Image: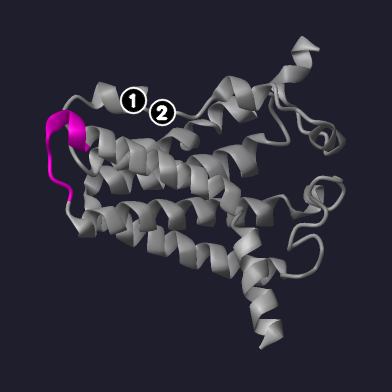
Amino acid sequence: MMMVGNQVRNYYELTKPKIWYLLVFTAFAAALTASLLFDLYVSPLTWVLIIGGVAAGSAAADTLTSVNDRDIDAIMDRTKGRPIPSGRISAKNALMFGLILTIISLVLAWLINIWAFALMVFGLFDNIVVYSKWLKRKSQTNIILGGFSGGAPALIGYVAVTTQNLEIGLVMDTHSHLESCIACQKGLCKGRYPYATRNFR
């Protein structure tokens, strides 16, 4: 029983909960703002779909990027203790777990509406493929072009309530590219990521 509990904690840690907690909050806040702003009722089912979909999608992205980055994570002090590089979870199992979460997130987003589904697809693709797979190790634009996915949860929360005045939803993109760009810590530099901030040092 203890082994099962430990493994559950390992998979939970793999999803980087501190990140997806924040993204779920932004989706919730955006949906609540849209509801209050336009005086629209949001059903309990829609709230469940918003929170569940964004949680699953964010956790899926964090899991699959961890699979992509496992070799770099293994040499960085900040990340070498994570579930995959520490050997607590195999890359194969993490991949399967991430794909299951991806499917769940897409199904839940589809049940909201086509806009939420499109934004979920965009967010997953931008974070997992554009940022982690294509640009993270190759281009100084990685955190900028790959950072757009951080705004997807807020937009999903907004369009789950209404699609009118979408420019308001765009303003709710609370993801700060600048803050991410200047967060090139010692561990990231050791991993030799080409962060744009190095041009300003």
Q: Residue 37 magenta-drawn?
A: yes
* Residue kind at label 2, given as amino acid type: Asp
Report the residue marked by disc 2: 173
* Residue kind at label 1, given as amino acid type: Leu
Give residue 170's mark: 1
Q: Secondary structure at mark 1?
A: helix
Q: Residue at x 80, y 68 (%)?
A: 87
Specify few, some or many for label 1: CA neighbours under 10 Å numbering under 14, 14-19, or 20 or more. some
Specify few, some or many for label 2: CA neighbours under 10 Å numbering under 14, 14-19, or 20 or more. some
Q: Residue at x 38, y 47 (%)?
A: 120
Q: Which residues are magenta?
A: 35-42
Residue 70 placement (x, y as % from top left): 75, 54
Residue at the extreme bottom of the image, as rendered: 1
Q: Are marks 1 and 2 in contact (CB under 8 Å)?
A: yes
- The front one of 115 and 173 is 173
Q: Secondary structure at mark 2?
A: loop
Give residue 123's mark: none
Residue 60 placement (x, y as % from top left): 52, 56
Residue 98 placement (x, y as % from top left): 55, 62
- The front one of 171 and 29 is 29
Quarter of the C terminus within the rendering: top right
